Image: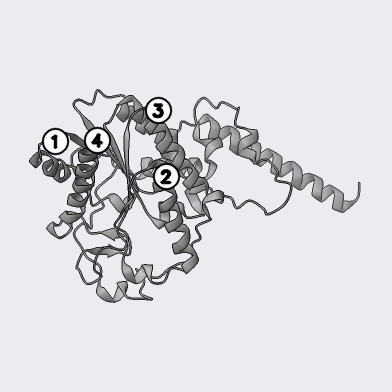
Amino acid sequence: MTDIKKVVFFVFIAFVISFTTFFITMSSLPDYVYEEHKEFYSQDLPGEKIFIFGSSQTYTINPMLVSENLNEKGHNYIIYHLGQGSFDTEERLRTVDLVVSQKPEIVIYGIAYQTFYSYGRNVIEKPADTFVELPKITDLFASVSIPLNTGLIDNPKYATINTINYFRQTFEKDENETITRPYPNTPFFEILGHEGIAAEKKDLEVGGKLASYRGNEIYPMEKNRTYTALKELIHELHSNEIEVIIFTVPHHKNWLEQLPIQQKQIFDDMLEDLEQEFGFEVFRLHDKYDDDLDIWADHDHLIAFSEKTDFYSQEIAKMLLTKMDGL
C-alpha cells in the first residue's frame, strides 16, 4: 500500500469512526424539544381552545389581549400562544399529533420570509437539475426508528442545535432561577429582558445594521422543504376538523425594499398557492405598517409589552373573528 493510499485509508476510517460515534451519541440522547412539547400537550387544557403558532416574530402577540377582544364580541375562547423562537414548520409538523390531541377549534400561524430561508434549522436542500435524482439520505433512513432522539433523522441540524443548546442552558442555569414567561398561556417563550425598547431610526434605515438585507435565499415552492411541511401541516389539521388561519408577520419596509424581486415573487407565489389550495385568505401584515412608527425592535420584530403594539394582538383577534363569522 502506497503512502497516499495509507493516508486516504486512515482518513476514511477516522471519518467513519467519528460519524458513528456522533450518530450513536446523538441518537441516544432525548429529543429535548419534542419532550418539552409532549409535556405541555399532555395536560388537560380546559375549555374551547385557540392555538397561535409562529417564530420569534409573533413574540409581541398577547394572548390575553386577543382573548379580551374575542370576549367583547361574545366569543369565549382560551388563547394559547405556542410560538417559539426559531421554530420551523418541519418541527411543528413533528408535533402535529400532540396538537391534534388537544382538539383546538382554530390554529392561527404567523409566517415570515425567514420561515422559508434555505439555511440552518430548515435543512433545505436544493435538488440538482439533472435527469437522475439520487435519493436523499433522510429518505433512505425514513423507516429507521430511533427511540429517543426522534428528530435526528428528520432534521439533523436542528436536533444537534437543540441538544447543544440544552446542555449550554443546563450548565448556565441557576438552580434557583425561575423561568419567566412574557404572558399567561405562553409556555415556550421566555422574557428577553429588552421588551419595550425601540430601535434607533438610523439603524432601521436602508443599509442600517437592523434593516440590511443579508442575501438569504428562499428556494421556489417545489424545492422548499419548509413550505412543503407547512402544507402538510395544514392538510393534517384540516383532516382533523381544525380550522387554520395563516398570516404574514410585520416587516420593516426599508428591509422589504432591499429584497430581490425574485425573492418577493417566490414569497407572493407561496401565499397565492396556499389560498388556491386551501380556499382561505392569507392575511398580509408583512408590508402594512409605517416605518416612522416607534414600534420596531428590528426589521421583523415589533417591540413587546407596549400599548404602541397592542394593534398586533388586535389584528389577530380580527382575523379570528373573520374566520368565526364565516363558519
Task: Mark 3: give few (<14), some (14-19) or many (20+) Cα within 10 Å.
Answer: some
Task: Mark 1: give few (<14), some (14-19) or many (20+) Cα within 10 Å.
Answer: some
In primary-sequence order, the first of circles 1 and 2 is 1
- Mark 4 highlights which residue? 327
Nearer to us of marks 2 and 3 is 3
- Mark 1 highlights which residue? 75
In primary-sequence order, the first of circles 3 and 1 is 1
Q: Residue at x 81, y 45 (%)?
A: 9
How far is disc 2 from disc 3 in space, using C-alphas? 25 Å
Residue type pointed to by label 3: Asp
Residue 44 showing in the rendered view: yes
Q: Which mark is residue 181?
A: none
Q: Which mark is residue 165?
A: 2
- Position of residue 187 relative to residue 123, above or below, is above
Nearer to us of marks 4 and 3 is 4
Q: Is residue 52 left or right of residue 305?
A: right
How far is disc 4 from disc 1 in space, using C-alphas? 13 Å
Question: Which corner quadrant holds the C terminus?
Answer: top left
For numbered disc 2, what is the local secondary structure? helix
Image coordinates for residue 51, horizontal then vertical, percent: 27, 37
For numbered disc 1, what is the local secondary structure? loop
Q: Residue at x 60, y 38 (%)?
A: 138
Q: Residue at x 14, y 45 (%)?
A: 65
For numbered disc 3, what is the local secondary structure? helix
How far is disc 4 from disc 2 in space, using C-alphas? 42 Å
Nearer to us of marks 4 and 1 is 4
How far is disc 1 from disc 2 in space, using C-alphas? 40 Å
- Mark 3 highlights which residue? 97
Query: Mark 2 touching mark 3, by CB under 8 A?
Result: no
